[in-house]
Image (cartoon, rainbow, N blue to C red):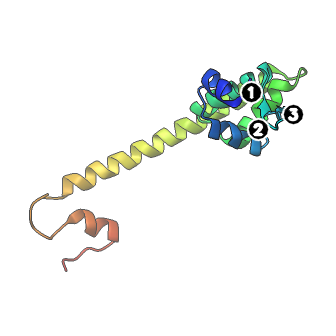
Amino acid sequence: MNISDVAKKTGLTSKAIRFYEEKGLVTAPARSENGYRRYAQKHIEELTLLRQARQVGFTLEECQELVALFHNPDRHSADVKARTLEKAAEIERHIEELQLMRQRLLTLAESCPGDDGADCPIIDNLSGCCHKH
């Protein structure tokens, strides 16, 4: 298969596929006599794993670990599950942080008259300033 075939099958762009290759996240494809990359089914599987792992928030480094586990016949599903639960907990922490940020923004917005005047409690609060200019 050539790179455009792989792109169609995996939902990745050719640029993304080459990026993952450059980073060593996928097995290097064989090259034909004319130098073109030749992909096999294992590349489709690796790249699909990468795309889907990225979609659920795994970092490139974490994806590299997942690809290594994918290739390891002696892997333990408990290790994969532990990594997945760690990622879910990390995402939960991010959600909590985002909710706090959102609440602060709404509180700031409530403090502002939102009129044509220059006095802006939002700017005053964000700048640490408590007096009018």
- Give the amino acid type for the residue marked by disc 2 in the picture: Leu
- In the rendered image, the quadrant that contains the C terminus is bottom left
Left or right of residue 103, residue 110 in this image? left
Identify which residue, 84 or 12, lies in the foreground: 12
Pointer 1: residues within 10 angstroms few (<14), some, or many (20+)? many
- Give the amino acid type for the residue marked by disc 1 in the picture: Glu
Identify which residue, 54 or 93, lies in the foreground: 54
Left or right of residue 68, residue 52 in this image? left
Q: Residue furthest bottom?
A: 133
Measured as percent of width and height from the top left, residue 122 is found at 25, 62
> Would you place residue 76 above or below residue 112 in this image?
above
Residue at horizontal 72 percent and vertical 27 percent from the top: 2
Left or right of residue 2, residue 114 in this image? left
Q: Residue furthest right?
A: 74
The quarter of the picture where residue 16 lies is top right
Element assignment for label 1? helix
Compare marks 2 and 3 and give the one earlier in the sequence.
2
Identify which residue, 116 or 111, lies in the foreground: 116
Residue 46: mark? 1
What is the C-alpha distance between the residues marked 1 and 3? 24 Å
The quarter of the picture where residue 99 lies is top left
Measured as percent of width and height from the top left, residue 83 is found at 71, 31
- Give the amino acid type for the residue marked by disc 3 in the picture: Glu
Residue wearing tag 2:
25
Left or right of residue 31, residue 10 in this image? left
Residue 34, visible in the rendered structure? yes
Element assignment for label 2? loop
Residue wearing tag 3:
33
Residue at horizontal 47 percent and vertical 45 percent from the top: 97
Residues at discs 2 and 1 in contact (Cβ within 8 Å): yes
Compare marks 1 and 3 and give the one earlier in the sequence.
3
Compare marks 2 and 1 and give the one earlier in the sequence.
2
